[in-house]
Amino acid sequence: MADSSGHRLFKFPKPQWMTSANTRNAGVYAAGALFSIALFVFIDAATFSKSNLNGSEFHVNFVDWIPGIFSVLGMLIINSIDKSRLSADNFSYSGDGVAWKARVVLFMGFAAMAGGLAGSVTVCLLKYVVREASWPALWFGVANIASNALIMLSSVVLWVSQNMEDDYTYNLAL
Amino acid sequence: MAGLKTIIVLSFILAIGFLLVILSAALYKNFLTLLVVATYVIAPIPNWLCGRASSQDDFMDSGSSSIVELGRFMTGFLVVMGVALPVVLAHCDLIRPEAMVMSIVGGLLIYGTIISFTMFFHQEEEF
């Protein structure tokens, strides 16, 4: 949104509330809330499948968990990276060779997360839609997709809120 | 002292919250909703623990450290879990919908009073 020399990309000025510390904290709480919603949407599908309300022959088993595991791994990788390592500046502690390693790890995190989302769509299509599951058995597939999408959204919110510049912080890049 | 009335009101609301949650379990003879109480009691703990981990006398701090943010993330997770868990249980017919409503309202009251107590006593210390 802005390069390091302070010139913004957009015509409109940056709103005042975007740089306060409270927005940053609210963003972190919101990311936790979204992650919780994601997890419980999927747990709802898994519990429903096991409960006695499930009259169909579709069940949630380990295959349904695999895309979620990849998404969570991707989120962990992406949000554990120290963002100042991504810049290619040669001064301070981003020495030679650290920047591209950080970028490779970030890429693998993004790939894991996108793979999780794509995998959840695949599982939903191949396991439920092709075999013509009707509602509520179709909920197992839809919940899987929704859960992975929400994990991705939570990761985005956490990344954005950790990147917000306070008035008192000195960010070297990004 | 104006603070005494606040304490009395907050304690009353806390008692009502506990009453609602215990009723939601006892009326329908299903003790799964007590998990909500456990969740809401545990919910402020990550925030508190990680707040202790940040440096105490840092007036001009260099932004929130990752540990503090991890604590906030987990607290947000636990607060929403306190609402989402009864919804999941009610959707899967493990508890009654009335028990779900009562335990969500009671749990939010308990959490709200815990937060209010924390803010109230924190402000008292500043004088």
Image: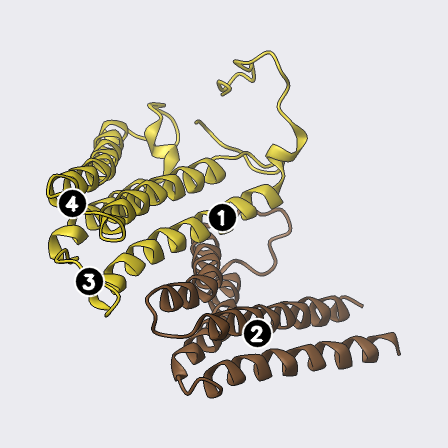
Q: Residues within 10 Å of mark 3 (few under 14, many from 20)?
A: few
Q: Earlier in the sequence, mark 4 or mark 3?
A: 3
Question: The residue marked by circle 3 belongs to what chain?
Answer: A
Q: Residue at x 48, y 77 (%)?
A: B37
Q: Position of residue B93 (x, y in %)?
A: 34, 70
Q: Quadrant of residue A117?
A: top left
Question: The residue marked by circle 4 belongs to what chain?
Answer: A
Q: Secondary structure at mark 2?
A: helix
- Name the amino acid type tagged 3: Gly
Colour pattern of the rendering: by chain
Q: Colour of chain A?
A: yellow
Residue contact at pointers 2 and 4, CB within 8 angstroms: no
| Residue wearing tag 1 | A30
A129 or A10: nearer the viewer = A129
Q: Is residue B112 above or below residue A108?
A: below
Q: CA distance from mark 3 to mark 2?
A: 33 Å
Name the mark on residue B106: 2
Q: CA distance from mark 2 to mark 4?
A: 38 Å
- Name the amino acid type tagged 4: Tyr
Q: Are marks 3 and 2 on the same chain?
A: no
Between tags 2 and 4, which lies in front?
4
Q: Residue at x 49, y 32 (%)?
A: A171
Name the mark on residue A128: 4
- Name the amino acid type tagged 2: Gly
Label the brown chain with its letter. B
Question: The residue marked by circle 1 belongs to what chain?
Answer: A
Between tags 2 and 1, which lies in front?
2
Q: Are marks 2 and 1 on the same chain?
A: no
- Name the amino acid type tagged 1: Ala
Q: Secondary structure at mark 1?
A: helix
Q: Quadrant of residue A156?
A: top left
